Amino acid sequence: MLTVFEDKVVLVTGGAKGIGRMISEGFVANGAKVYISSRDVKACEKACKELNALGTCSSLPLISVPTPSLIPTSPSRQRQRTRHPGRFLQA
């Protein structure tokens, strides 16, 4: 019998704790291959071990996030950033 998410791949950011953890568990229990990401490396690994008892789960702990000033941008984006320094712009 096929489950709802069989042969599907899901990425759950914040999937190691709280609501994200419950969402991860729901996808795993329904047949999806789940990747969870979290800033807390230990919690990410622990949740993944627990979820592997139900199905397939892999952890993708967040190692570092570049600050917006380190992301290469075009000169026009640089001008936008200086006019609106509090607003994050995608590179």
Image (spheres, rainbow, N blue to C red):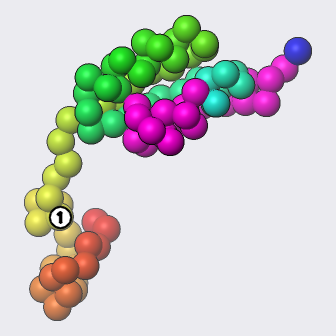
Picture coordinates of residue 49, whole percent (x, y): 43, 12
Q: Residue at x 28, y 73 (%)?
A: 89
| Residue 35 % position (x, y) | 47, 29
Residue 15 in view in this figure: no
Is residue 51 visible to the viewer in this orientation of the structure? Answer: yes
Q: Residue at x 43, y 19 (%)?
A: 48
Indicate whether residue 73 is drawn in magenta.
no
Residue 40 in the image, given as x and y percentages of width and height: 26, 33
Q: Quadrant of the N terminus?
A: top right
Q: Residue furthest top?
A: 53
Judge left or right: residue 40 versus residue 29: left
Q: Nearer the viewer, residue 91 or 16?
A: 16
Residue nearest the observer in this picture, 67 or 28:
28
Judged left or right of residue 51, residue 89 is left
Name the residue that disc number 1 marks: 68
Q: Position of residue 75 (x, y in %)?
A: 16, 80
Q: Residue at coordinates 47% horizontally, 14% vertically from top-left?
A: 50
Q: How many marks?
A: 1
- Local crowd size for mark 1, using a 10 Å CA cut-off: few (<14), some (14–19), many (≥20): some
Magenta region, residue range: 2-25
The disc labelled 1 sits on which kind of residue? Answer: Pro
Specify whether residue 22 is painted magenta.
Answer: yes
Mark 1 secondary-structure assignment: helix
Quadrant of the image containing the C terminus = bottom left
Would you say 6 lies left or right of 50 here? Answer: right
Q: Is residue 17 above or below residue 80?
A: above
Q: Quadrant of residue 55?
A: top right
Q: Is residue 70 above or below residue 77?
A: above
